[in-house]
């Protein structure tokens, strides 16, 4: 599914060059749920950008779904981002002027899907994240947790090979964060969606089945989580939420 | 992403920034309206002037003494005489009518009122040559001319000044302390339409021979008419040749035709239209720069949006097209409103000035073409800037 071999990334600013990634080797199997952890400056953000095809590696190869993206042009990278990757950001990154429905339709516009099908698929995706009754709301009319669910619906809607989530619970309270993790776990277990979560919170990482630790541009530990936390169980134990 | 979706996305972008889009449009609206109004009013005015010139007949000609092409100044021997005029009438076959004419500017008087007046001393054929229309009374006859009668045909403007509303017929007008009887009133000469804006000049026409006794040494110019427009130039040449032969001189006479006048007027009016049009064009240019300015602000403001769109799979081309279409739509909508306003303004002016309203599809097409070009020209730089953004940087932009 994802195969990264001997990948390096060097940033050059004037005379100084900084090596952010030093020969990374990583494989992520289809249908798995992986966390990437590490302190700031560990290279996990760089890894995230390269995994998301927003940036290109200096050397090494990155194969996603059988396509070596390290050799692709800008135009083809945009296509990969559109078809194979679904982003979920810490700050949600929804377009503020568009309704939830229109935000979810956005990736399909760039995929060239006709408007009727777009609407159907967007409605289905929003239903999946439990927002069927909020489709005409704008982001500022939604709670943080709801916004992140819109973002997840948007990430899902083109049936990507992986969902890349960058600190997806970072801006949320515990309960909303747990709800997001619940959605991820359901998507992973029931629909076999591959999910990679970048986080610096151990508790969040413990919801996955594998944690890859980064430090100083290398992987220092690749650990298996034997008993991942079930978000659903945690949610049941939390006191019922007041209306958000 | 197909073009229809791009247009939709661009329209949404314009719609969410209603006020700003409207203000940006205003620059284009004013620019296009100014260009359309100026061009249309210019064309209408030109047509009005030319048609009134042509209504006098393009087979008119004037020959007069001029030292412009001569080595020596005009002397008494070079002046055109009444005998010359008779000779022309008899010898040059293409001449339909001819009148010795002399223009003077003096003060005339009725009662205590004095007015500066152009006195035209001429023959009885002047009326038909100039295509003058009588409002009341009659023109003087050749007998009145030969017997040096003190009769005058005044134009409407002079009649209005002296006898406001009343019939001028039979009234006395004093020229050089000599009373003249008004026997006719003619319409104002349309050839004075060139001096639009002011009042038409006040004119009084008297028989040539009467004028001779009143004013010594009248300088004659020959005004005449040929049978057809095509003969005018040839006739002028023949008359000039005949005059040189009769006076045994060279290069002392010149002639011009109304046809030439029309061509000259046309040329001058064209230049004026071009100058004013260029000034109006500058306001369109300023409007275009306004569009670029706002698009640049918009790109900076929406950096994050651009980053998000790129992350979701927008190609650089999609971003470029989105912003370009936004600029073009602003310009096209502004251009449409401007065209309506400019056309309306031009129609109003045409109505007031009683000019033919000349709104050609060409003008409107040019306005459209221009606004779209301005959109592309001033939109391409901001759009390109947007498309060149680095998605990672753009996503991080606060």
Image (tube, coloured by chain):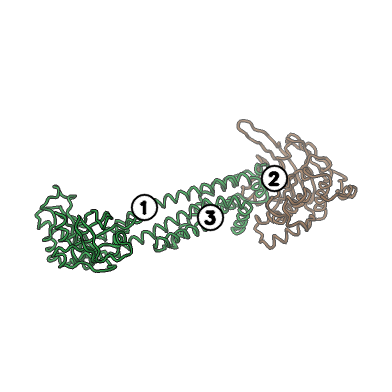
**Disc 2 sits on a residue from what chain?**
A
Q: Are marks 3 and 1 on the same chain?
A: yes
The disc, 3 or 1, on the residue closer to the chain's N-terminal end is 1
Instruction: Kindly indicate whether the residue at mark 1 contacts the one at mark 3 (C-beta within 8 angstroms).
Output: no
Quadrant, the N terminus of chain B: bottom right
Eye-nearest disc, 3 or 1:
1
| Colour chosen for chain B | green
Name the residue that disc number 2 marks.
A62
Chain for colour brown = A
Q: Secondary structure at mark 2?
A: strand
Q: Position of residue B364 (x, y in %)?
A: 46, 60
Q: Residue at x 36, y 59 (%)?
A: B46
Instruction: Locate residue B224 relative to residue B396 in the image: left or right.
Output: left
Q: Secondary structure at mark 3?
A: helix
**Disc 1 sits on a residue from what chain?**
B
Name the residue that disc number 3 marks.
B334
Q: Secondary structure at mark 1?
A: helix
Q: Report, in whole angstroms, how far the alpha carbon at label 3 lies from the one at label 1.
A: 27 Å
Residue B131 in view: no
Q: Residue at x 47, y 49 (%)?
A: B283
Name the residue that disc number 1 marks.
B272
Instruction: Locate residue B216 relative to residue B41 in the image: left or right.
Output: left
Instruction: Locate residue B323 relative to residue B157 in the image: left or right.
Output: right
């Amino acid at each position: 599914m994802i195969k990264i071999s001997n990948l390096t990334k060097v940033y050059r600013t004037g005379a100084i060059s900084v090596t952010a990634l030093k020969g990374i080797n990583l494989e992520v199997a289809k249908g798995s749920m992986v966390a990437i952890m590490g302190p700031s400056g560990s290279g996990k953000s760089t890894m995230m950008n390269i995994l998301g095809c927003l940036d290109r590696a200096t050397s090494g190869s990155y194969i996603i779904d059988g396509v070596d993206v390290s050799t692709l042009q800008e135009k083809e990278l945009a296509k990969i981002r559109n078809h194979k990757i679904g982003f979920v950001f810490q700050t949600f990154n929804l377009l503020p002027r568009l309704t939830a429905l229109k935000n979810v339709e956005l990736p399909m516009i760039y995929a060239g899907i006709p408007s009727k099908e777009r609407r159907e698929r967007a409605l289905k995706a929003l239903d999946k994240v439990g927002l069927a009754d909020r489709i005409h709301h704008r982001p500022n009319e939604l709670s943080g947790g709801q916004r992140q669910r819109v973002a997840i619906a948007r990430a899902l809607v083109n049936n990507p090979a992986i969902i890349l989530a960058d600190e997806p619970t970072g801006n949320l309270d515990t309960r909303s964060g747990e709800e997001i993790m619940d959605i991820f776990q359901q998507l992973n277990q029931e629909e076999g969606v591959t999910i990679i979560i970048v986080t610096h919170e151990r508790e969040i990482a413990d919801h996955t089945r594998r944690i890859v630790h980064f430090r100083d541009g290398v992987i220092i530990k690749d650990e298996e989580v034997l008993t991942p936390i079930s978000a659903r169980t945690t949610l049941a134990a939390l006191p019922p939420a007041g209306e958000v | 992403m197909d073009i229809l979706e791009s247009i939709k996305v661009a329209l949404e972008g314009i719609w969410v920034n209603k006020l700003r889009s409207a203000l940006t449009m205003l620059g284009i609206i004013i620019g296009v309206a100014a260009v359309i109004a100026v061009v249309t009013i210019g064309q209408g005015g030109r047509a009005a002037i030319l048609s009134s010139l042509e209504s006098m007949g393009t087979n008119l000609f004037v020959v007069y003494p001029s030292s412009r092409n001569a080595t020596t100044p005009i002397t008494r021997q070079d002046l055109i005489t009444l005998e010359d005029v008779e000779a022309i009438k008899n010898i040059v076959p293409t001449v339909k009518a001819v009148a010795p004419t002399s223009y003077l500017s003096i003060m005339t008087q009725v009662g205590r009122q004095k007015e500066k007046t152009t006195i035209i001393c001429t023959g009885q054929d002047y009326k038909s040559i100039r295509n003058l229309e009588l409002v009341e009374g009659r023109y003087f006859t050749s007998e009145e001319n030969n017997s040096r009668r003190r009769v005058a045909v005044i134009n409407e403007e002079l009649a209005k000044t002296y006898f406001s509303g009343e019939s001028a017929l039979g009234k006395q007008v004093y020229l050089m302390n000599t009373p003249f009887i008004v026997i006719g009133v003619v319409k104002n000469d349309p050839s004075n339409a060139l001096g639009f804006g002011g009042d038409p000049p006040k004119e009084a026409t008297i028989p040539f021979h009467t004028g001779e006794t009143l004013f010594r040494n009248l300088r004659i110019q020959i005004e005449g008419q040929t049978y057809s427009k095509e003969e005018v130039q040839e006739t002028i040449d023949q008359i000039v040749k005949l005059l040189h032969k009769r006076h045994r001189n060279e290069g002392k006479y010149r002639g011009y035709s109304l046809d030439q006048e029309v061509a000259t007027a046309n040329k001058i009016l064209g230049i004026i239209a071009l100058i004013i049009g260029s000034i109006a064009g500058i306001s369109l240019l300023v409007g275009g720069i306004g569009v670029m300015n706002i698009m640049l602000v918009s790109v900076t403001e929406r950096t994050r949006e651009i980053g998000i769109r790129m992350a979701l799979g927008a190609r650089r081309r999609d971003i470029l097209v989105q912003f370009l279409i936004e600029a073009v739509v602003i310009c096209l909508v502004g251009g449409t409103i401007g065209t309506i306003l400019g056309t309306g303004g031009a129609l109003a002016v045409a109505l007031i000035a009683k000019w033919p309203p000349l709104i050609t599809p060409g003008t409107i097409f040019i306005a459209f073409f221009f606004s779209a070009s301005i959109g592309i020209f001033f939109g391409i730089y901001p759009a390109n800037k947007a498309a060149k953004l680095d998605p990672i940087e753009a996503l991080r932009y606060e």
